[in-house]
Amino acid sequence: MNVLKPDKKATLVTLLKNNISQREISRKARIDRKTIRKYGRQFDIIPSPDKGDSSPSTELVITGLDKDQNQNPPPRPPVIPVDTQKIPFHARSACEPHRKWIEQQVRLGRNAMSIYQDLVERFNFNNKYNSVKRFVRGLKKNTPKLFDRLEYLPGEEAQVDYGQGAMTLHSSGKYRRPRLFVMTLKYSRRCFRKVVWKSSQETWARLHEEAFRYFGGTVKYVVLDNLKEGVIKPDIYEPELNPIYAAMLNHYGVMADPARVRDPNRKGTVESAIQHTQDTGLKGRRFESIEAQNQWLMHWEEVWAAKRIHGRMKRQVELMFQEEKPSLNPLPLTGFRYFQQETRKVYDDGMIQVGHSYYSALPAPLHQDVIVRIYEHEIEIIDPVTMEKIRTHIKSSRPGAVKMAPEDRIFNPSRQTVYLLGKAERIGPFTRKLCELMFEQQGRPGQRRMQGVVNLARKYEAGCIESAAEKAVEMGLLGYKSFCRLVEACKSSTDTKSEISQEHKLIRPSSDYGAFFDKFAAKAENNIVLSRENLPMVWQNADWLKVIEIFGLEPKKQSKNDEIWIKSPFTGEKEASLHIHLKQNIFNDFSSGKGGGILNFCQDMLGQKGREMNCYQVAGWMLENQISDLNQTAKPVDPKPVQKLNHPKENKPVKVDLRPFFKPGHAAFEKRGISMKACQYLGCGYLPERPDGATSPLNGRLVFQVRGISSDLKPIILSHVGRSLTDRQADADGRYWGFPFYKKLEIYNQDKLLMDHSAREQAERFGLILVEGFFDVAALVSSGCLNVGALMGAHISTEQIDRLKFIASHVVIKEIKLFLDRDDAGRKGTQRAISLLTQNGFTVKVFDWEQQFDRPGCPPVRIKPSIKDPADLSGSQIKYLRKQGII
């Protein structure tokens, strides 16, 4: 105990009697406050503790009060009444008289200095700033924040983040700290750790892939913070993810759940895992390479971290991971294809530049931005508005290369040599020979003459042009005007003839057509077989006006009495671009490039409506519809028996299997709601174009593998059928293209109905569903309906009936449900199928497209008219039909 000298003791007593605070006395007289209180009690200036507790019982802000005393946080300071009589006068704060005013200023967010200045100015405050500072500090004391305890199911969530690794020798020769990536499973706390020198979009995504492979599966959600590798634009409601990261997560079926900005507590599990790794696994260590640090992290995780007892869960991490592992989603069969996504502007020639090469972006609008995804061997051009793929090109490695299809190029005479020769060959071989001579002799200027020669087909018949070309080749006339005179002379001589010539160099001998005619001659309704001699007569006597009336075409203008202009039915242009010559019975379509006689026009129109006919069948159709008639002098030909084609009794298997080359997942499948699992189950997918440039009509299409069943009940490959994705593919090789096989002998998906256990069970329980096409089967399989087969058309054949009997001999089929399309062909096919299936002992039910569906508390609804086939139904609609027992 300190003993003060008399002078200091006298000074202390004087200060205490003058109500000077102990703090001020300690500061000025340099006396410890315990000593001050001891002498104060000796002279009865300070009350003793045994006389009563002088400490405040309520929350009163006191100068010098202990900092741990609880206070309400601003802007609501305490309003509890205080009994100031219990607090000694010398212990009160000098700011106490101004409490209400100071509390009001604190609510406004003012700091202690501004409040002190106003106290001095407005209230003549004579004390020090420190008194105000301590008083305001007491008002701002916060209560501890309460946090929620988050619990998750096994396989539901993982958390990821970056930290700092241990000191590692860099290529620069200095030791540096690499970036430490950690993914932690929320349920089991099992971690994947790896260090990298640099981070990027692709590195961030690849680390996720490695973590998924390490765990042996994927979770439903990944929680991350808002780093640029994962989130481009943070937002509370809809953050914008990095496209590569979003595509990778979509490939693995994982959803990203970014935390709020400046909210690390949302992913506290991975934050604790990073701190645990740094403090326990890496602290005090140095590594000579980044590979050595990764090996140590893997060893430390397997030996120590995974076998520890977790502090909060009180269980072993490895044991919890073994519980969680069955709940992880399975990994896809193939890894994610990485790409670089960039934005390019379409040039005025329809091209974009990627690297040092140029690629066609048509039909994208000119001078507009498009999204380009650059893969290892190909590039994809995507519409930035609809996010649909526009074009796909094989990636070029040669600088300056131009990837542009001939259909994308506008007309340019300097590049049209092959095109003009092709048009000349359609007129005849001598016309092509004449054009070749023009080009060989005159070079590029000769292309103008070639263009003039082939354009004569708009005005003259092909026979006249070919006859004139033969004479021009013999005489060596290569001038355009001289050739025009030859064509005009040939036309004049042809007009003077009263009969059609039956023998000419342009007309092939009848022996060339004999075998074909004997098999495919078409009968008219009057039982007269149309002969080769009658075919020109049908053409000559045909009436264009009746053709226009039958096909519902509307003439737009008539420049002359023998000429008519109509809108092209082949391109759908608004302006009349198809010219018809009534006397010569020929047409020329300037928009589509088609041309020929009236018989060719009818053949193209019928083919557009799905009725493919040869020339004899078209001529018979023209006679049936009174478009033309036969000359009365023509004698009917004795009818000959029409030989039917002998179809094969079975399809031969092929050895080619294209499934390894299919690209899993495609926008066209996703748009129809067809899952990747369904594509793998059925053996279908997108067949990309080949990098070496050699292509088949199947490349660039959605390809379905058609399989049959051998006699020993093993699946065999019969063909591959591709569905076109662009109009260019459809015009070139048809909407569907496949290797030849007789589809009326098979039922698509029959191998799964016989060999797959789940499909057999569903067929025995629900019956067999018959649809028309490949996409219908894929849509039903995506929704879990495996008991489905396709007729590959609207009409069932007797051979397919036999195939169904074969399936029913191995699988118990209680009934067959017809789920054909909603159009006229589907209705007619349904009636035919009902008749044939009933005759062969099958129980048949038909899906009613017009039926009503009752919903509790809602009016009944029907299937929308826009839905035309099963593939148009959504997955939830198909599942509803299955749940209700309709399919």
Image (tube, rainbow, N blue to C red):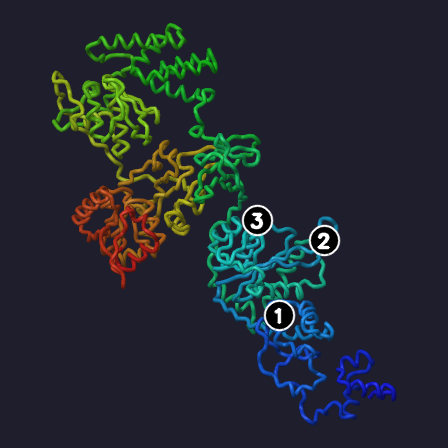
Precedes in sequence: disc 2 or disc 3: 2
**Percent position of residue 13, x then y:** 81, 88
**Percent position of residue 434, x then y:** 39, 12
SS at mark 3?
A: helix
**Percent position of residue 288, x then y:** 71, 55
The answer to which image quadrant residue 430 occupies is top left
**Gap between marks 3 and 1 measured at Cα:** 53 Å
Residue furthest to the top in view is 475
SS at mark 1?
A: helix
**Gap between marks 2 and 1 measured at Cα:** 56 Å
Quadrant (top left/top right/bottom left/bottom right) for the N terminus: bottom right
Lateral position of residue 418 relative to residue 641, left or right: right
Write the residue at 44% across / 13% down: 446
Q: Residues within 10 Å of mark 3 (few under 14, many from 20)?
A: some
Precedes in sequence: disc 3 or disc 1: 1
**Gap between marks 2 and 3 measured at Cα:** 24 Å
SS at mark 2?
A: strand
Quadrant (top left/top right/bottom left/bottom right) for the C terminus: bottom left
Write the residue at 81% across / 87% down: 14
Residue closer to the observer: 294 or 882: 882
Q: Is residue 216 visible?
A: no
Q: Which residue is denoted by mark 3 in the rendering? A: 202
Q: Is residue 168 above or below residue 353?
A: below
Q: Which residue is denoted by mark 1 in the rendering? A: 105
Badges 2 and 1: C-beta atoms under 8 Å apart? no
Q: Is residue 362 visible?
A: yes
Which residue type carries mark 3? Glu
Lateral position of residue 857 relative to residue 13, left or right: left
Q: Which mark is residue 169?
A: 2
Which residue type carries mark 1? Gln
The answer to which image quadrant residue 425 occupies is top left
Q: Residues within 10 Å of mark 1 (few under 14, many from 20)?
A: some
